[in-house]
Image (cartoon, coloured by chain):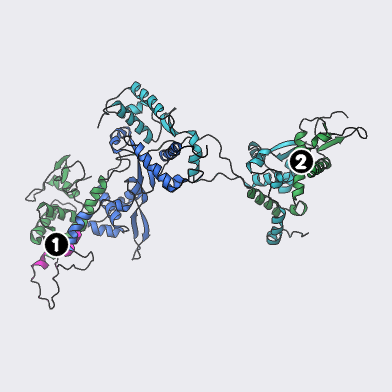
Chain colours: A green, B cyan, C blue
């Protein structure tokens, strides 16, 4: 970053430093505007453009920006530009444009002002230049102050503590609605729905089919009566009975009775052969 | 302030570096915080002090392969999870349909499921449901190959907040609506009963 | 543990979330940590308590544009810098002045910036600010060429620890001088009083 004389010079540099040459700060532009060839390039880089250079000249000469003496300022500026040209530095068009502007203002200042018909206030040819200078100076200072604000990674760091998580897989959630939709998709796909409309009663039977199969998991014969849970009440018993019949029909269980009124045994159809 | 002027301040520097570090810091790195190397032992003792200081807090100082770092305690995961934007993953259509068939038609074999869905049911689908603890094999059908009979488990009911299978959403009503609304969309003209 | 069972634990949850958050958390987000919404006031009071609790520590709880966040105190940067592989970028005056103009005069086009600075603004300058995430194009001016309108981002505010643009350093000093002149900021020649 190049440093320049500025009220709000970036931290660490004296205000009067206008640039650096070979690492040594340059504190002043030479009074007579003779600029050593090596320094010129440095100085050119030190300014952000013609407005910046003009502001420097104005502040340095302690000129009231609201009442700029155009003749000496223009002369100084032109000398500076001339010096740059003398050293064959490629002058940015912006610098030449400003030179033309200054000359134009100066000539308008020198002309006798034509008496105006009305009492309208006079136009100051410098007004626009002053406005631009002040607006630029304002932004230049604002930039320096922004740069001084504490900034992350330069002046402080965000705190970021590692988040420990159990290495459990995040399980998908399923809602009843999902199940319903899934079934409807199946139904839509096939003609299943005509044959397999699921009724509540049927579902209850199917639930008991599963319960009975779980009770028969030992692969052994179980006494028929023990399959029934009497706490379920009459309706439950009927459903359990229907479930058993359905299991028989689907050939999932085998029911045996050696003789009339003898105990009825139930066994999973896939169980290893018991006594037969 | 180039060197901390007290042991308390020394600890604060190490704590602050660990709080802001994007990765675990080994002792060798922590020594570099100071202009004059405090040595490994002093740093290590300070780390142990910090571990104590953070007892009972929401984060803890732990030693990992890469060095020391602060991390949140597992008990706080339940809170932090609520801030996560990401939705939990969704099961594929195949998994959901298989689950629906097992739930509504249990006990069913893999073949039954394939008959109903009209496509082959991959092993992964059934594995996903089994490892979730939602379905299991409750028996075998006495047919060639003795295929396993799948049914839903108690955990399935619990996880979906059901007391019994009869509390599954009834399908008749919606199927009726579907017959009215969606019929034109089916491939083959369905036969109305 | 679904709800914290004490106010101390409540504070710990909020503290832990803030320590672990990758971005500032607004009060509205912090309320979401809990199964039962504790309300904004309780959360806000807890935040103020935490600000106090962290007095004298190496990090502080601050409020930025996006919400609340822990950051290290400026005094500790001298230590933390020693661990850094590379220095943070220093911005040229061209970049800083461009940033200032965008910040104070937004939304502005590149042409507006060039008018104020009196020089051509190189593409690299704007690129540097865009890649830092500090400015972006928020629209296009309806003039020939439809130039992009630049504005500062929330990240700009956060990175500079500002809650809003109104917290930018005031321009009053110079504006006072300009008031004296009372120059219209238009293109027409101004009228001197």
- Asked if residue A118 lies in the magenta stretch, the reply is yes
* Residue at the far right in the pictured view: A260
Residue C166 drawn at (x, y percent): 30, 53
User: Could you tell whether B73 is left or right of B188 in the image?
Assistant: left
**SS category of the residue bearing label 1:** helix
Residue C20 drawn at (x, y percent): 42, 38
Residue A125 seen in the current view: yes
Q: Are marks 2 and 1 on the same chain?
A: yes
Between label 2 and label 1, give the one nearer the viewer: 2
Question: Which mark sits nearer the N-terminus, 2 or 1?
Answer: 1
Displayed quadrant of residue A170: top right
Displayed quadrant of residue A169: top right
Residue B147 drawn at (x, y percent): 76, 37
The residue beneath circle 1 is: A102
Q: Nearer the viewer, residue B12 or B162?
A: B162
The residue beneath circle 2 is: A232
**SS category of the residue bearing label 2:** helix
Distance CA(mark 2)–CA(mark 1): 105 Å
Reply above or below: C135 against A114.
above
What chain does badge 2 belong to? Answer: A
What chain does badge 1 belong to? Answer: A
Displayed quadrant of residue A155: top left
Q: Nearer the viewer, residue B64 or B156?
A: B156
The magenta stretch is A106-132
User: Could you tell whether B178 is left or right of A8 in the image?
Assistant: right
């Amino acid at each position: 970053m190049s440093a320049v004389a500025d009220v709000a010079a970036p931290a660490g540099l004296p205000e009067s430093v206008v640039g650096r040459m070979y690492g040594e700060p340059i504190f002043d532009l030479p009074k007579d505007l003779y600029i050593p060839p090596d320094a010129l390039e440095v100085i050119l880089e030190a300014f952000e453009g013609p407005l910046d250079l003009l502001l420097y000249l104005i502040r340095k000469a302690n000129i009231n920006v609201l009442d700029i003496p155009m003749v000496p300022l223009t002369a100084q500026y032109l000398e500076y530009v001339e010096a740059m040209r003398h050293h064959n530095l490629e002058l940015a068009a912006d610098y030449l444009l400003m030179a033309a502007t200054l000359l134009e203002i100066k000539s308008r200042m020198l002309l006798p002002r034509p008496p105006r018909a009305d009492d309208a206030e006079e136009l100051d040819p410098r007004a626009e230049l002053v406005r631009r200078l002040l607006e630029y100076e304002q932004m230049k200072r604002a930039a320096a102050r922004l740069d001084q604000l504490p900034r992350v990674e330069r002046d402080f760091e965000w705190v970021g503590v590692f988040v420990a998580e159990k290495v459990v897989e995040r399980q998908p959630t399923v809602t009843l609605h999902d199940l319903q939709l899934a079934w409807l998709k199946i139904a839509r796909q096939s003609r299943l729905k005509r044959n397999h409309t699921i009724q509540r009663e049927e579902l209850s039977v199917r639930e008991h089919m599963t319960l009975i199969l779980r009770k028969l998991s030992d692969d052994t014969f179980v006494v028929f009566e023990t399959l029934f849970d009497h706490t379920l009440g009459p309706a439950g018993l009927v459903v359990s009975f229907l479930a058993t019949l359905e299991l028989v029909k689907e050939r999932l269980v085998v029911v045996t009775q050696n003789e009339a009124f003898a105990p009825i045994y139930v066994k999973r159809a896939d169980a290893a052969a018991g006594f037969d | 302030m180039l060197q901390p002027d007290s042991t308390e301040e020394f600890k604060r520097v190490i704590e602050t570096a660990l709080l802001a570090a994007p990765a675990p810091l080994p002792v060798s790195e922590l020594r570099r915080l100071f202009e004059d190397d405090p040595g490994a032992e002093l740093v290590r003792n300070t780390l142990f002090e910090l571990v104590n200081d953070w007892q009972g807090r929401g984060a803890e100082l732990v030693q990992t392969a890469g060095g020391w770092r602060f991390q949140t305690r597992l008990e706080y995961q339940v809170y932090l999870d609520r801030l996560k934007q990401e939705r939990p993953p969704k099961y594929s259509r195949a998994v959901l349909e298989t689950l629906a068939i097992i739930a509504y038609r249990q006990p069913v074999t893999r073949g039954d499921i394939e008959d109903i869905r009209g496509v082959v049911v991959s092993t992964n689908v059934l594995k996903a449901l089994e490892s979730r603890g939602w379905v299991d094999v409750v028996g075998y059908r006495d047919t060639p190959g003795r295929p396993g009979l799948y049914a839903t488990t108690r955990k399935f009911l619990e996880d979906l907040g059901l007391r019994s299978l009869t509390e599954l959403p009834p399908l008749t009503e919606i199927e009726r609506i579907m017959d009215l609304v969606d019929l034109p969309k089916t491939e083959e003209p369905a036969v109305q009963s």
